[in-house]
Structure formats: C-alpha cells, structure tokens
Amino acid sequence: MKHLTDAKVRAAKIADGKYLNDTKVPGLRLELRSIKSGVGKYWVVRVSLGSKRPDISLGAYPAVSLDEARKGAEEKRAIAATGVDPRKKAKKAKAKGVPVSPNIKTFEYAAEEWIKTNEASWTPGVTDDTRGRLVRHVYDHIGHLALDDIDGPMILALLKRREG
C-alpha cells in the first residue's frame, strides 16, 4: 500500500471507504463522512495507552494539511509512548492558557540552546561528547516533551534506565 498524498486526500470520496490509512505514520487515518455539502474529511490518530487504544482528532482537511496531520500524529504518539494521555495533556495546557502547538519549547530545544550558549567556553570534544550523550541517552525519552511536562519521576526513571 502506498503512502497518502495530497492529491489522494483531495480526491477522496465516500466510495473509497469510511477512511484512508496513511502508511507513513502508524495509526494516522483520514475519516470520510457524508455532510450536506459533500464529503467531510477529518484526521484521526489511534494511539496506545496501556490496554486502551483511543482515537484522537487532529482536525479537518483542508484546514489541517497532510504534513501537519503527520506531524501532529507523530507528536501524539510520542507523548502516548511516555505513558501520558495526549488528550489530558492538551486539556491541561488549554486550562493553563498555553497554546497546544509544535512551537512549544521542548527539552531537546532547551538542551541545544544550552549547548550553543556554552560552546564557546568548551573544547570541541566536550561539546561533541555532551551532545552525543544527550542524543544517545536522553532525547529519545524526553527530548520531545515540553519543559513543563517533565517531572521528577520521569527524570528518575531516565536515570535508573541509564544505571541498569
């Protein structure tokens, strides 16, 4: 099966089925619904949260493009992989008045800014070693998380993983 393309999404009709799966991002699909003016197209991603597999809405096409839906789906799946429910995270952010967007500063962004700030006073070896350790041991686990979402137990779990 081939990946979805913008042309396929644009041309999608109810006759194609109730939904079209994107093979590029696991769990991402375009749901097709009959509406008065034709076909409603809605992006949805299914994530795994323990034994549950909730569907999370990413928005309607064309307001949310294929690329934006893929990025959103990857972000939701990454959050779910840490054991956090992306729906609750979004509600929490909305209640705080924080915009839910990929522009929120992540741990990886903050760490790279810290490296840039200190790079001039470090030797090239220290800079490379520091970045390498973060890439190998930290970014995969918490690099994608917003700084406000990282708590003590997450850091302890990361350190214990590194110990063992």
Image (cartoon, rainbow, N blue to C red):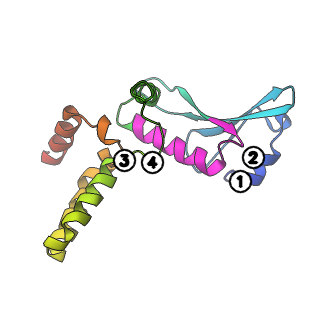
Q: How far apart are marks 2 and 4 (CA)?
A: 26 Å
Amino acid carrying label 4: it is Asn
Tag 4 near tag 1, CB within 8 Å: no
Which badge, 4 or 1, comes first in the chain's sequence?
1
Residue 102 lies, with reference to residue 133, above or below; the image says: above
Q: How far apart are marks 4 and 1 (CA)?
A: 25 Å
Circle 3 packing at 10 Å, graded few (<14), some (14-19), many (20+), is some
Q: Disc 4 vs disc 1: which is toward the camera?
A: 4
Q: Do the residues labelled 3 and 2 touch (CB within 8 Å)?
A: no
Indicate the position of residue 129 as horizontal and vertical percent values. 18, 67
Q: Residue at 53% across / 43% down in the picture?
A: 72
Q: Earlier in the sequence, mark 2 or mark 4?
A: 2
Residue 161 appears in which quarter of the rendering?
A: top left
Q: Which of 13 and 127 is in front in this view?
A: 127
Give neighbour class at mark 1: few <14, some 14-19, many 20+ (Cα, 10 Å).
few
Report how far apart the C-alphas of labels 1 and 2 lie in the structure.
Answer: 6 Å
* Residue 37 versus residue 139 in the image, above or below: above
Residues drawn in magenta: 59-80
Task: Give the residue drawn at x 31%, y 35%.
Answer: 149
Q: Which mark is residue 103?
A: 4
Mark 1 in CB contact with mark 2 (< 8 angstroms): yes
Instruction: Give the structural element (helix, strand or loop) at label 3.
Output: loop
Q: Is residue 21 left or right of residue 40?
A: left
C-alpha distance separating marks 1 and 3: 30 Å
What residue is shown with label 3? 105
Give the residue displayed 19% in from the left and 34% down from the top.
152
Circle 1: element type: loop
Q: Name the residue under label 2.
A: 9
At label 2, counting other C-alpha atoms closer than 10 Å, the crowd grade (few under 14, some 14-19, many 20 or more) is some
